[in-house]
């Protein structure tokens, strides 16, 4: 199927271990590629690029608990728990093994999926993400302050600037689907922030058996690019690619190059 064709689209709900409903969206046909979005975002994070993979894969997204059409319980969230939500969706759909591509907080969750359920992950792509914990390279204080300012419009502008370079934005004025789920309740936003901040998979990374591709924008200040070699050093069969000049949203800003690199990696024969 050409990437410009309208793929088969199926949506529904799976049920998490604690009973929370998890909305999913399965597009296309072929080997499943699970796409995991960033913190406080729903499946629309992938709207701009998911069709790039439909020549060879079906794409499976979900709305994280707390976002979109999923349940929004006011309980503790963790990246480990969100990984089990991913497994619940795969089980619901009868998918035994899939390729997995997680970005930002989705990359944190993907680390746990691959480490705790190695038989479920064929190939792993980790984008603009971090191992978490004390060994990770954290964003600087100025970035934290820019995102926490009381003026919501100014905070959103700061986030947009962290995602994309001014040069790219001048030719792509938006709207952008990577700046958070506007319908997300405040308690869920706090729960997502805690889950991302508490992530620490350092000790689990050597358990990842899947061939892994680590991607990052060189100018990423939201999740500094120094985290890419840290991840690759801990995952046994990992390689890295850095996109020069790109920020956190490398997957959109460098779309042709990034899509080709990911597709070529997924097409390699599995050892």
Image (tube, rainbow, N blue to C red):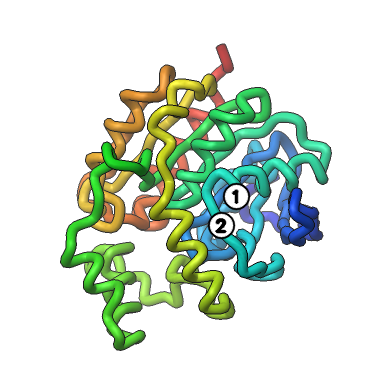
The residue drawn where x is 27% and y is 69% is 161
Q: Quadrant of the C terminus?
A: top right
Q: Is residue 230 left or right of residue 51?
A: left
Task: Give the quadrant of residue 213.
Answer: top left
Label 2, on which residue? 77
Label 1, on which residue? 82
Question: How many C-alpha atoms fall within 10 Å of the one at disc 2: few (<14), some, or many (≥20)?
Answer: many
Residue 122 location in percent, x, y? 61, 26
| Element marked by disc 2 | loop
Question: Which residue is the extreme one toward the front?
Answer: 75
Q: Is residue 139 above or below residue 186?
A: above
The residue drawn where x is 71% and y is 67% is 71
Q: Is residue 127 above or below residue 20?
A: above
Task: Give the quadrant of residue 123.
Answer: top right
Residues under labels 1 and 2: Cα distance? Answer: 7 Å
Is residue 77 or residue 94 the one in the foreground? 77
Q: Is residue 182 above or below residue 128?
A: below
């Amino acid at each position: 199927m050409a990437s410009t064709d309208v793929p088969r689209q199926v949506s529904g709900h799976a049920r998490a271990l604690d009973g929370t409903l998890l909305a999913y969206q399965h597009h296309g046909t072929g080997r499943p590629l699970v796409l995991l979005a960033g913190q406080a975002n729903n499946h629309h994070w992938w709207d701009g690029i998911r069709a790039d993979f439909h020549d060879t894969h079906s794409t499976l997204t979900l709305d994280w608990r707390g976002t979109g059409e999923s349940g929004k319980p006011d309980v503790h969230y963790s990246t480990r728990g969100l990984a089990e939500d991913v497994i619940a969706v795969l089980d619901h759909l009868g998918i035994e093994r899939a390729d997995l591509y997680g970005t930002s907080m989705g990359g944190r969750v993907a680390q746990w999926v691959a480490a705790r359920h190695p038989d479920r992950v064929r190939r792993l792509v980790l984008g603009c993400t971090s191992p978490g914990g004390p060994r990770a390279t954290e964003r600087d204080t100025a970035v934290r302050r820019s995102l926490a300012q009381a003026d919501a419009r100014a905070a959103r502008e700061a986030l947009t600037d962290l995602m994309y370079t001014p040069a790219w934005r001048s030719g792509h004025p938006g709207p952008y689907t990577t700046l958070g789920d506007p319908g997300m309740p405040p308690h869920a936003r706090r729960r997502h922030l805690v889950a991302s901040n508490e992530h620490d998979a350092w000790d689990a990374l050597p358990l990842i058996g899947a061939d892994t591709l680590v991607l990052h924008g060189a100018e990423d200040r939201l999740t500094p690019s120094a985290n890419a070699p840290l991840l690759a050093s801990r995952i046994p069969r990992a390689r890295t690619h850095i996109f020069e000049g790109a920020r956190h949203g490398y997957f959109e800003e460098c779309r042709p190059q990034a899509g080709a690199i990911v597709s070529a990696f997924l097409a390699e024969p599995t050892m």
